[in-house]
Image: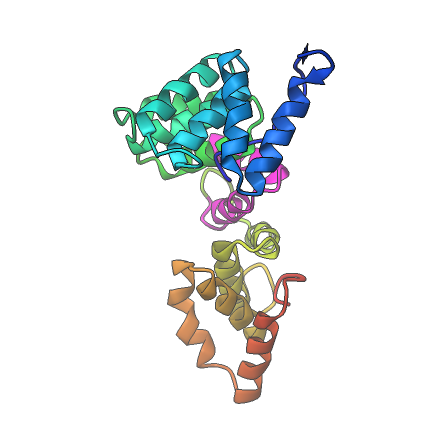
Amino acid sequence: MAWLERFAPQSPAVDGDTTVGARMTAAYEAASRGDYAAALETWALLAHAGVPRAQSNVGACFAEGLGVERDRALAARWLTLAAEAGDPVGQRNLAALYFSGDGVAQDYARAAELYRKAAEAGDGPAQDMLSWMLLEGEVATPDYAAARRWAEAAAVQGIAAAMTRLGLIYHNALGIERDARLAAEWWAKAAERGDADGQAMLGAAFHLGAGVPRDAVAAFTLLLRARRGGSALAAPFFEAVRGTLAPHELAEAEARAARPLTGAGA
């Protein structure tokens, strides 16, 4: 439910002693169980009453077809109401529509503006996306320093993709002095949270001895996890590392990769 978010508990009481927050929470829990009809019934009432987070969640349901027929144009209308009211989740979700041109005319500048507003309000996924846009420089003017700051902000909120990006920033010396140790530390944090790209890059670091000691078994363990997680970044190193391992080392790496995540290289 990446589009849906819980309510920020700051609304006044409505309907006697029932707070908006309590009703929003109950609706979110219903959606978490897959009962989108019940969630939408509550969110629609509150959205029409002007509750921005409810408007955002109604828009999210139309965007993703959750309990209703998918309608990105109608989603954009609800998300615009939420965004204009200052809801950071509504801003982030509306930005996603402008970025993809789904339900609205594609507008990267408008998407970046909305992501920035949401990021400045503390929305972690928006901080992560804004960081990516500023780093890649394909749809926004590149700004490595700002990309790093927003990635750091998102990483504080536990967003693993931002941690992987920070590792790449330090590894590739993008706007900052190269630091292989810090790069590996960020990749380790991302890898521990299950980020496949972070696992791939940490595996490469163990293979090359970049910021961490060389460890072929740890490298292959991570590359196995990364490949299973769908990371294309594992491919350039996978066969090279496998070719260095003895049969018992391959078996050890396979066994480690099959275990639940407990730490980098575990």
Q: Quadrant of residue 217?
A: bottom right
In front here: 202 or 11?
11
Q: Which residues are magenta?
A: 146-173
- Horizontally, residue 158 falls left or right of residue 133, namely right
Q: Residue at x 30, y 36 (%)?
A: 138
Q: Which residue is the extreme one toward the bottom?
A: 247
Res 65 visible: yes
Q: Position of residue 94 (x, y in %)?
A: 40, 25
Q: Is residue 11 above or below residue 265?
A: above
Where residue 222 appears, as percent x and y from the top left, is 54, 66
Q: Position of residue 227 (x, y in %)?
A: 44, 65
> Is residue 8 positioned above or below 210 on the image?
above
* Of residues 127 and 103, the one drawn nearer to the viewer in this rendering: 103
Tag count: 0
Q: In the figure, residue 153 lies in which quadrant? A: top right
Residue 232, above or below 16: below
Colour scheme shown: rainbow
Inspect the magenta stretch and tell me whether residue 29 lies in it. Answer: no
Q: Residue furthest right?
A: 17
In terms of depth relative to the viewer, which is nearer, 116 or 255? 255
Q: Residue at x 43, y 71 (%)?
A: 238
Compare residues 165 and 12 and report the one nearer the observer: 12
Image x and y of residue 166, in percent: 52, 44
Going 49% across and 64% down the picture, which residue do you hit? 204
Q: Give the main secondary structure, helix, strand or loop, of the magenta stretch.
A: helix
Q: Residue at x 54, y 32 (%)?
A: 38
| Quadrant into which the C terminus falls | bottom right
Residue 8 visible in the picture: no
